[in-house]
Amino acid sequence: MRSVENRQSNSINKLLFDNARLFFSVTTNLGWKIMGERLKNELSALNSSGKHGFRAFTLSNKWSPFAWSANYSESERVLFPILDPHVAFWLASSAVRREAQQYDVIVAATAPLASAFLVGKRHPYVFQFVDGTRDIFRRDFGIDNISDAAIERERKHFHQVQHTFALSNWVKRNIVDVYGVPANRVTVVPPLAQSVMEKIPRRKRNKRLQIAFVGGDFIRKGGQNLIAWQRQSLHKFADLHVVTDPRWNDSSVPATRWYGHLSNAKIVDELLPSVDVLCHPTTRDCSAIVVAEAAALGVPSVASSVGGIPEALLHNPP
């Protein structure tokens, strides 16, 4: 894992300018704020100018009825797909955009957020982190409310940004082969354990297996399957710890503790160090940041072979 981190740091370092002022802008959705904070620490350590900024920004609720979204879940559909998310971010982020103008390089997650900074002929260099594309959402995940025009707009966007950091080779292949972006403008940065994550001492083990499930989108993350397994046989030898939306809490499931929503700090500092394994039976995912967090703490994961997740797992551990 250390060699992966070194390759990651070296690849990023080659793309940064000496003493450049970096502005990190991340959305707070889908775990990107946590990923963004790690990237800020990682990249800031490589670039010693010290003149860096960080802003977590996402669309407010008032934009929700208007901004189209490529949701993973079949049951989630936006009723009024008026605005492309790239356009919505551009309209809503004028203050952030003005703030970013004083920096040399903008590091943005995700692609719609990066598009907010591609304004005018003299905008700063824009780098973006992505774990998927619209073409992947439609082709691999079967999300049918993505038009050819939307994919073409995103293709043009990927050619506009100076560089794209993909969280898996699976994503990079799509960006290069389908969107036609030169391979030297896409760098794979696996969401594995970052060097900034400190390993937390493991606690004394319980005689029963302790399993954790972390996923706000309970259905898409495979929570129903895991609960069925727990009812059928797992409860005989394992305790299940479930972090998800409280509406899915079911006290009738044996040997199961429901936590509702937990902060990332509590998940990393308290829950994961106390369990034996993380179970991530997701049905639709481009990457899995929680798997990376578990790895950083020495907790093995059992996860679905979906999207870029297989690249984050060691399939035959020693």
Image (cartoon, rainbow, N blue to C red):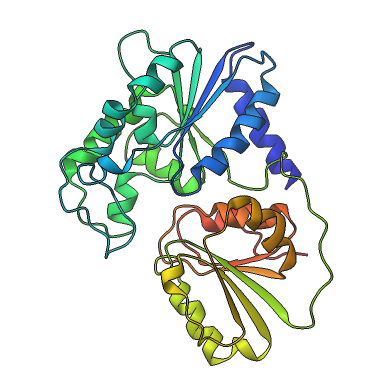
Q: Say which residue appears at 34% left-offset and 57% top-offset.
A: 72
Residue 218, image quadrant:
bottom left
Whether residue 221 sits left or right of residue 76 in the image: it is: right
Q: How many marks?
A: 0
Quadrant where the C terminus is found in the figure: bottom right
Closer to us: 258 or 214: 258
Whether residue 100 sits left or right of residue 22 in the image: it is: left
Q: Say which residue appears at 68% left-offset and 62% top-offset.
A: 272
Whether residue 97 sits left or right of residue 78 in the image: it is: right
Whether residue 41 sits left or right of residue 287 in the image: it is: right
Residue 90, image quadrant:
top left
Closer to us: 54 or 85: 54
Q: Would you place residue 223 above or below residue 125 in this image?
A: below
Q: Provide residue 127's location: percent of width, then percent of height.
A: 47, 26
Q: Would you place residue 24 above or below residue 100 in this image?
A: below
Q: Would you place residue 140 above or below residue 57 in this image?
A: below
Q: Say which residue appears at 45% left-offset and 56% top-offset.
A: 307
Q: Provide residue 12's location: percent of width, then percent of height.
A: 60, 28
Q: Provide residue 209's location: percent of width, then percent of height.
A: 71, 79
Residue 158, image quadrant:
top left
Q: Residue placed farthest to the top in the image?
A: 122
Q: Say which residue appears at 57% left-offset and 39% top-offset.
A: 189
Q: Provide residue 174's location: percent of width, then percent of height.
A: 38, 44
Q: Would you place residue 112 above or below residue 94 in this image?
A: below
Closer to us: 121 or 218: 218
